[in-house]
């Protein structure tokens, strides 16, 4: 199956999808499923919905993390606290999750992120 074939199948299921959405779904489906060609119409539609939900959740986490990092950079005093370190660790995990969606690791979610601590180091 070519990318064009997969794109045509996606456009049949989601005629309102933009070109960017179709291209993104092609990439995510190709990387996230072993063989998108083997998916029937119903399974492809369900898989597309699942991928969109995962992408939206990851994008939301990424946006929240960017906001936290911007806050951290504005307030950074030169000394790292435990809160600063855990913020950076969560940022790495969220960024890793985004990259895994796009480069094809089948383990979609990384699990829970560490909670924010209340004190310093």
Image (cartoon, rainbow, N blue to C red):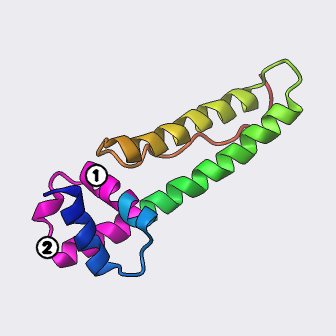
**Foreground residue among 45 and 20:** 20
The answer to whether residue 121 is left or right of residue 8 is: right
Place residue 53 in its image quadrant. bottom left
20 vs 32, left or right, is right
Residue 6, how many percent across, how many down? 22, 64
Callout 1: few (<14), some (14-19), or many (20+) C-alpha neighbours within 10 Å?
Answer: many
Magenta stretch: dominant SS?
helix
- Category of crowding for the residue at label 2, using alpha-carbon neighbours closer than 10 angstroms: few (below 14), some (14–19), many (at least 20): few
Residue at (65%, 31%) from the top-left corner?
88
Sequence order check, earlier mark of 1 and 2? 1
Q: Which mark is residue 32?
A: 1
Residue highlighted by disc 2: 40
Near-viewer residue (23 or 109): 23
Tag 1 secondary structure: helix
Does 104 appear in magenta?
Answer: no
Residue at 27 percent across and 79 percent down: it is 12
Q: Is residue 66 among what the camera can see? A: yes
In the rendered structure, are the residues bearing label 1 and label 2 in contact, judged by CB atoms less than 8 Å apart? no
- Asked if residue 46 lies in the magenta stretch, the reply is yes
* Residue 118 in view of the camera: no
Left/right of residue 60 with respect to residue 54 in the rendered view: right
Q: Which residue lies most toward the left here?
A: 38
What residue do we see at 36% from left, 66% from top?
50
Question: Viewed as shown, does residue 121 lie left or right of 5?
Answer: right
Residue 13's quadrant in the figure?
A: bottom left
Read off the magenta span: 24-52
């Amino acid at each position: 199956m070519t990318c064009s074939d997969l794109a045509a199948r996606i456009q049949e299921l989601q005629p309102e999808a933009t070109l960017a959405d179709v291209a993104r779904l092609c990439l995510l489906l190709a990387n996230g499923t072993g063989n998108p060609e083997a998916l029937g119409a119903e399974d492809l539609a369900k898989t597309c919905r699942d991928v969109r939900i995962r992408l939206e959740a990851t994008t939301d986490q990424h946006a929240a993390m960017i906001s936290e990092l911007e806050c951290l950079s504005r307030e950074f005093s030169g000394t790292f606290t435990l809160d600063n370190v855990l913020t950076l660790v969560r940022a790495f995990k969220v960024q890793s999750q985004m990259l895994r969606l796009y480069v094809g690791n089948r383990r979609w979610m990384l699990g829970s992120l560490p909670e924010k601590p209340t004190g310093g180091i």
